[in-house]
Image (tube, rainbow, N blue to C red):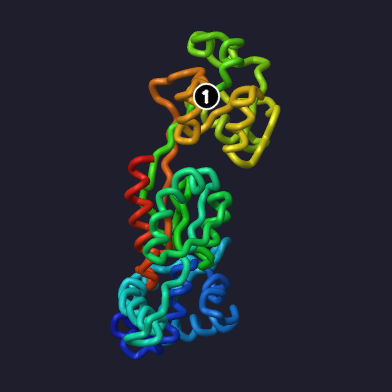
C-alpha cells in the first residue's frame, strides 16, 4: 500500500469522510462519534477504514476506553478542523440569511458550584437570548458526556487527560475545616492547632461520601496522616453537608466559597488556619475546535470572567 502524506491526499477526499474523522478525533471513540453524527457505529468504522486506505496511514489505535489518534490523525485534524467547522456553521444556519435562534448551551459541573456561583453569573445572559441547560454530576461522568456530545461546557474538578478535550483554569477553591459554634467551644479554641487531629477524636464527621474524599485530602495535606473512620452523616451535596454542620451535627471540610456567609456570621467557626491550606483548581472544559453556536462562546467568556472572583 502506498504511503501518502495527509496534506497531499486530503484535497481529493470525500468531505463526509473528513467530517466523520473529525468527530471521531474529538469524541475519542467510534461509538460517541456515531451518536454525534446520527450514524451507526459500523458505518463510522467503515468510513474510517476507507479513509485510512485512501491515505495509506493508520489514523487511530484502539484503547481501553475508545481510540487514540496517531500523529498522522493529529496533523490531519489540525488541517481540516477550521474549514469543516466553518462549513458546518453555514450548513447549520440553513444558508446565508437564515434567522434561526442558537441552540441552548448545555453546561455541566458540580451542583454546588453551578448553583451558587455559575448560575448567578450566567443569569444576565438570558437577556441576550441565551438559553441554558444545566446538568450536575461527578467530573469523570460529565467529561465522558462532553466527549460524547451531551454537553458544550463542563466545569471539571480535575484537569482532563489526553487530547480529546481542551481546558483552561477557571477558579481555585480553598478548603476549610469548620464546626458549629457549639462544637467549636466543646473542642476548645486553638486545640486543633496545638494537638492536631487528636483534638477531634470522638467528634462526629459529616462528609460528601462514605470514602470521605474532601476530608481525606485535608487530613493528608494539613496533618500529614491518613484519615480513617466512618462519617456520622453522608450527603452527596455539599450544601446539605453545610446545613447539617451549621445545625450542630459535627465537623466537616468545605470549600470556603460555599460557607463565606456562615463564617462571617459566626454560624460556622474555622477550627484551624493552616499556612498552606488545600486548594483545588477547577477547569472549564470543552471539545477542541470552535463551536458553531455563538452562545457557547458567550457563556464560556462569562464564566472565565466571573471565575476570577470566585
> For numbered disc 1, what is the local secondary structure?
strand
What residue sits right under mark 1 in the picture? 177
Location of residue 103 in the rendering, given as x and y in whole percent from the top left corner: 46, 71
Up/down of 300 relative to 50, above or below: above
Q: Nearer the viewer, residue 147 or 42?
A: 147
Q: Residues within 10 Å of mark 1 (few under 14, many from 20)?
A: many
| Residue name at image x 63 percent, y 25 percent | 247
Up/down of 270 relative to 233, above or below: above
Location of residue 15 in the rendering, given as x and y in whole percent from the top left corner: 40, 87
Residue 308 visible in the shown view: yes
Q: Answer left or right for 207 relative to 95.
A: right
Up/down of 288 relative to 161, above or below: below
Q: Nearer the viewer, residue 245 or 139?
A: 245
| Residue name at image x 50 percent, y 84 percent | 47
Q: Which corner quadrant of the image does residue 248 belong to? A: top right
Q: Answer left or right for 307 relative to 238.
A: left
Amino acid at each position: 500500500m502506498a504511503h501518502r502524506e495527509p496534506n497531499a491526499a486530503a484535497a481529493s477526499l470525500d468531505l463526509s469522510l473528513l467530517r466523520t474523522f473529525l468527530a471521531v478525533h474529538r469524541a475519542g471513540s467510534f461509538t460517541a462519534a456515531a451518536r454525534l453524527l446520527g450514524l451507526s457505529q459500523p458505518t463510522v468504522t467503515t468510513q474510517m477504514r476507507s479513509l485510512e486506505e485512501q491515505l495509506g496511514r493508520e489514523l487511530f489505535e484502539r484503547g481501553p476506553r475508545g481510540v487514540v489518534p496517531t500523529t498522522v490523525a493529529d496533523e490531519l485534524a489540525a488541517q481540516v478542523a477550521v474549514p469543516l467547522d466553518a462549513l458546518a456553521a453555514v450548513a447549520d444556519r440553513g444558508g446565508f440569511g437564515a434567522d434561526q435562534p442558537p441552540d441552548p448551551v448545555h453546561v455541566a459541573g458540580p451542583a454546588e458550584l453551578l448553583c451558587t456561583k455559575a448560575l448567578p453569573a450566567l443569569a444576565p445572559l438570558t437577556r441576550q437570548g441565551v438559553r441554558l441547560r444545566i446538568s450536575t454530576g461527578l467530573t469523570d461522568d460529565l467529561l465522558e458526556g462532553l466527549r460524547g456530545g451531551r454537553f458544550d461546557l463542563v466545569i471539571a474538578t480535575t484537569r482532563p487527560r489526553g487530547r480529546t478535550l481542551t481546558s483552561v483554569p477557571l477558579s481555585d477553591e480553598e478548603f476549610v475545616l469548620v464546626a458549629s459554634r457549639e462544637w467549636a467551644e466543646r473542642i476548645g479554641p486553638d486545640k486543633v492547632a496545638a494537638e492536631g487531629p487528636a483534638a477531634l477524636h470522638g467528634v462526629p464527621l459529616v462528609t460528601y461520601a462514605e470514602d470521605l474524599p474532601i476530608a481525606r485530602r485535608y487530613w493528608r495535606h494539613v496533618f500529614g496522616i491518613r484519615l480513617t473512620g466512618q462519617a456520622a452523616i453522608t450527603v452527596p451535596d455539599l450544601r446539605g453537608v453545610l446545613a447539617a454542620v451549621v445545625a450542630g451535627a459535627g465537623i466537616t471540610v468545605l470549600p470556603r466559597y460555599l460557607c463565606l456567609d456562615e463564617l462571617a456570621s459566626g454560624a460556622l467557626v474555622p477550627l484551624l488556619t493552616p499556612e498552606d491550606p488545600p486548594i483545588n483548581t477547577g477547569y472549564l472544559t470543552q471539545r477542541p475546535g470552535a463551536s458553531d453556536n455563538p452562545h457557547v462562546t458567550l457563556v464560556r467568556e462569562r464564566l472565565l470572567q466571573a471565575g476570577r472572583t470566585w
